């Protein structure tokens, strides 16, 4: 059975991004459907997969990472107001019954992602 996971690394601080809120949405013909909201643990991961079992199915999804709240809380230096990055939305497709891992590498002025394993 497939599953969807994520983790967030704070590349500016060189550590996992603990306490960052992550939302999961399914994108369909009728618009966006909110599926779940979770907060990253001390390892920067969710405590359980964002999708698994019968809820895991092919389609288009979007993670929305609430980066602004996390960056303000963890800042070691003064950040600009407004922040350069606040909400980071990553839209991706699931096409097979497999493990999809969508990590976020985050700093106050940039981010990257990829399909991990």
Image: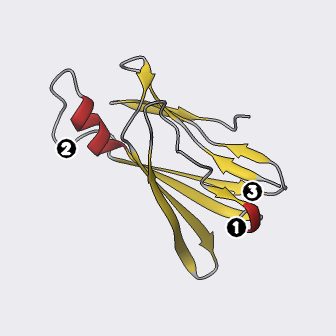
Bin the neighbour count of mark 2 within 10 Å (Cα to Cα): few under 14, some 14-19, many 20 and up. few
Q: CA distance from mark 3 to mark 1?
A: 12 Å
Front residue (pair 83, 58): 58
Q: Is residue 66 above or below residue 29?
A: above
CB under 8 Å between callouts 3 and 2? no
* Helix, strand or loop at mark 1: helix
Tag of residue 94: 3
Bin the neighbour count of mark 3 within 10 Å (Cα to Cα): few under 14, some 14-19, many 20 and up. some
Q: CA distance from mark 3 to mark 2?
A: 34 Å
State which tag comes first along the sequence, 3 or 2: 2
Tag of residue 55: 1
Tag of residue 82: 2
Question: Seen in the image, is 45 located left or right of residue 78?
Answer: right
Question: Seen in the image, is 15 located left or right of residue 91?
Answer: left
Q: CA distance from mark 1 to mark 2?
A: 37 Å
Question: Seen in the image, is 85 located left or right of residue 4?
Answer: left
Q: Is residue 44 above or below residue 62?
A: above
- Kindly give the residue lying farthest to the top in the view shown: 14
Q: Position of residue 40 (x, y in %)?
A: 45, 42
Residue visible at 19% across and 43% down in the picture: 82
* Helix, strand or loop at mark 2: loop
Rendered-image quadrant of the N terminus? bottom right
State which tag comes first along the sequence, 3 or 1: 1
Q: Is residue 5 above or below residue 12?
A: below
């Amino acid at each position: 059975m497939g599953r969807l996971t994520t983790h967030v690394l704070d590349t500016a601080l060189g550590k996992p991004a603990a306490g960052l809120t992550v939302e999961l949405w399914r994108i369909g013909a009728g618009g966006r459907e909110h599926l779940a909201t979770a907060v990253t643990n001390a390892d920067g991961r969710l405590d359980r997969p964002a999708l698994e079992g019968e809820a895991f199915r092919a389609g288009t999804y979007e993670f929305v990472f609430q980066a602004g709240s996390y960056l303000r809380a963890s800042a070691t230096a003064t950040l600009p107001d407004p922040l350069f990055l606040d909400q980071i939305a990553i839209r991706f497709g699931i096409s097979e019954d497999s493990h999809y891992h969508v990590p976020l590498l985050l700093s106050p002025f940039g981010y990257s992602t990829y399909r991990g394993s």
